[in-house]
Image (cartoon, rainbow, N blue to C red):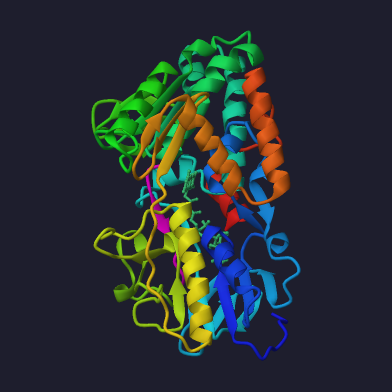
Amino acid sequence: MNIPQSSFPRVVIIGGGFGGIALAKKLSKKEAQVVLLDMHNYHNFQPLLYQVSTGGLEPDSIAYPIRKVLQGYPNFFFRLANVEEIKTDTKRVKTNIGEIFYDYLVVATGSETNFFGNKGIETKGMAMKTIPQSLNLRSLILENFEQALLTDDLHERDALMNFVIVGGGPTGVELAGALAEIKKGILPKDYPDLDTRRAQINLVQGGDRLLPAMSAKASQKAEKFLEELGVNVWKNIRVTDYDGKRVSTNTKTIFDAETLVWAAGVKAVGLKGLDAEEMLCRGERLRVNHFHQIEGLEDVFAIGDVAQMESEDYPHGHPMMAQPAIQQGRNLGNNLVRLLEGRPMKPFVYKDKGSMATVGRNKAVVDMPNFKFQGVFAWFVWMFVHLYFLIGFRNRVVVFINWVYNYVRFDREARLIIRPFKKQNRVKRDNLIQD
Ligand SMILES: Cc1cc2nc3c(=O)[nH]c(=O)nc-3n(C[C@H](O)[C@H](O)[C@H](O)COP(=O)(O)OP(=O)(O)OC[C@H]3O[C@@H](n4cnc5c(N)ncnc54)[C@H](O)[C@@H]3O)c2cc1C
């Protein structure tokens, strides 16, 4: 990999997401050589992917070059590499660009969409976990409306304008709300010769409430907000299959829809060599102790979505969210410094700062540890927090200007089919671009 030899111990980090970046920042001024490997050369701010999918933001404004985050640190090296295997016996990482030795290894590979083995949904449905996938969804939505204009068949036209979003967590709720706003504010202007009132946005949730990880009040309010926006909320229904046109469920309800978005599950991004049965927990997460060390390995750590640290308060590990990943990255950074200095490491303690979701203009729900609120104020808090955590001054400015413009003009101008999308090529295309 052509990384210079150093007298400092080498820490290899796999993944430049929330956890990997937080860790690299902590270590980069310390006496360690830090090598960050990622298959993308950018950090992806996943919480705003749904805005890319729905034309509210350009992808560039939620992505940031990893090299730029850590510019100017002499002991920091980035390599664009797809990690293929970990060889713990020889302390080496095998990648598509060669192998690298580590003194300490940190796995921060995040999570990917979990289709639970359902091939129909995986090949015909849409996922929204990466920027290419969000762009695919944006293209498909717009192409479907263009296609709807061309057909005389009412049933086909309705199916082209029907959306089924599976999963009532924050991703499903936010996407459903954004699509409902497009239906109301944009489609009638863009497609005056199409009866866009017939477009249906269906949010299907397997459980008995939306946002199950949030308070009951937040769930109720989110559902009420969605219904006000005209979203059909279906609860206690599980989607069982999709053939590209028809969505089957475990009830008699079926949906004819050309677009199905799967937001009903994620699993950890695993790596060959770290897949022993005793290392893995539910969702293929890597079991780690309170110092982030992977079960049975003292010099290999895992943080963020890929890691499961069980405790009394979090028996199934921390939520797969940005805050746990960031806090774990920072704690591990401090611990590695302690380790290098021969001092004992400190166990990780998660500080829950709350969670939030937005449904649309002036409509959001926020659960803070001691304070829960919904509505306009919650929406402003949601915007402020997301702007704060976006990486890069330019991105913050661009997103802020876009939001103000969209708010004032009731518009979303990035509704562009830059890269046409063909559903039948979905898996091939996702693989080509992101894997
Ligand atoms: C649509 C969506 C909305 C979300 N909204 C919120 C929200 O509102 N609030 C919130 O807190 N959280 C939200 N999340 C979850 C949050 O984004 C994740 O919890 C967080 O990104 C986890 O951080 P991480 O560092 O573990 O992994 P990630 O940020 O996913 O980073 C993993 C990195 O590893 C790289 N990688 C993976 N495998 C390899 C490999 N083999 N070789 C090289 N590189 C590899 C990837 O390219 C990626 O850069 C959302 C997620 C999604 C998908």
Residue at point 63%, 9% (across, down): 192
Which x, y percent locates residue 327? Answer: 47, 61
Is residue 268 found inside the magenta-colored segment of the image? yes
Which x, y percent locates residue 426? Answer: 55, 44
Residue at point 50%, 24% (across, down): 362
Would you say residue 419 is visible in this rendering?
A: no
Q: Quadrant of the C terminus?
A: bottom right
Displayed quadrant of residue 317: bottom left
Which x, y percent locates residue 391? Answer: 64, 51
Q: Is residue 44 left or right of residue 119?
A: right
Give 314 or 277, whichever is nearer the viewer. Answer: 314
Q: Which residues are magenta?
A: 262-272
Is residue 376 found inside the magenta-colored segment of the image? no
Extreme residue toward the right, this view: 72
Residue at point 44%, 46% (across, down): 122
Which x, y percent locates residue 26? Answer: 58, 69
